[in-house]
Image (cartoon, rainbow, N blue to C red):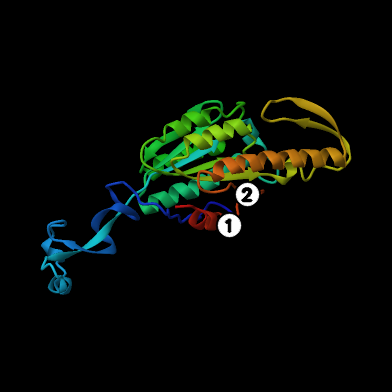
Amino acid sequence: MTDANGADIAYRVPWRSGAMRSGAHRSRFSGTSGQHRGVVSLLENPDPRRIAIRESLRDPFEQVLVRSSEQLSTIQIAVLIDVSASMSFVGRARKIALACDIATAISDSAGRYGDPCAILAFDNKLRWDLSIHVSRARSARAAVLENLRKFEPSARGMEGAIEAASLLSGSRKLVFVISDFLWDVAAAADIARVLGHHDVIAIALDDSRQLDDLPEWGLLNLVDHETGRRSLVVMRPSLKAAWRSAIRTRRNSINECFSQAGRPILEMRDRIDWERLMTHVMYGSLP
């Protein structure tokens, strides 16, 4: 699939949910809807409907044993979307549109799983006008994402990411961070530290026209979308190579920050590779 229409991002987590509400994920609680755990004493789980007759007859202590299963519970999902000025770039694709496509697929999948989901947009502050806190209402999230799709990013800075991350206190959550990650490394480290308690999936949006498609030689009038500064540059192969090296060095440093939260950054260039994204979400996590 190449667009968000019908895209389904199935996800699972290797950790157990602490939520009491029934859902689709393994939890720390006993119940009747999940996998069989074994047998326990009737005194420990007083449910005579689940008496295990064979195991009770074989028990050397002559206890009455009952079957124990784990409860399937919900988890909380949060999608943090960078709407700072650099996300306004339009090359082979529009960055903010790609971010909305991914967020829409996550929101729709959360609805199918019955998981509450938050959409939090940020630039130099948390943009409540483009956000919705934890909600099970898919229509409300869809309205927010539609506004985000029409939004033209212009504010400089990404300090609002810390504010958004700070809202996600409490039980462990599955957190998606969608950005181009043209961030200061120290700021990225702070955000990764605040989110360190959660299961974080960082998705970096890149566009080949930002650097790779630039000519090897020429006089170029370039605009830094994050600062708004224009520069007249004499392009040459050595300068292009130096820029590419600097970008890769910074990306590797930011990647190391987020890897400590469980997963390396997943890079998407020019389009969304849904199959690759699904694989990363399903299997790229640490317990």
As drawn, the label of residue 268 is 2
Measuring from the top left, give residue 220's x and y in whole percent.
84, 33
| Residue that mark 1 sits on | 276
As drawn, the label of residue 123 is none
When asked about the image quadrant of residue 90, the answer is top right
Other residues around mark 2 within 10 Å, as few (<14) / some (14–19) / many (≥20): some
Q: Which residue shows up at 50% across the image and 30% down it?
A: 162
Q: Given the image, on which type of amino acid does mark 1 rest?
A: Arg
Measuring from the top left, give residue 231's x and y in whole percent.
80, 27
| Left or right relative to 12: residue 232 | right
When asked about the image quadrant of residue 71, the answer is bottom left
Q: Give SS at disc 1.
A: helix
Measuring from the top left, give residue 33's x and y in whole percent.
26, 60
Q: How many numbered discs sit on the rendered protein?
A: 2
Q: Nearer the viewer, residue 79 or 170?
A: 170
Please say whether residue 129 is visible from this viewpoint. no
Q: Nearer the viewer, residue 94 or 42?
A: 42
Please say whether residue 141 is visible from this viewpoint. yes
Q: Which residue shows up at 62% across the image and 48% down it?
A: 267
Q: Nearer the viewer, residue 81 or 192?
A: 192
Q: Is residue 86 above or below residue 17?
A: above
When asked about the image quadrant of residue 41, the answer is bottom left
Q: Disc 2 vs disc 1: Cβ atoms closer than 8 Å? A: yes
Q: Which residue shows up at 27% across the image and 58% down it?
A: 70
Q: Is residue 115 above or below residue 159?
A: below
Q: Given the image, on which type of amino acid does mark 2 rest?
A: Met
Q: State the separation of the CA atoms marked 2 and 1.
A: 9 Å
Measuring from the top left, give residue 147's x and y in whole percent.
50, 36
Other residues around mark 1 within 10 Å, as few (<14) / some (14–19) / many (≥20): few
Instruction: Give the mark, 2 or 1, whose residue is nearer the N terminus.
Output: 2
Q: Which residue shows up at 49% across the image and 46% down it?
A: 104
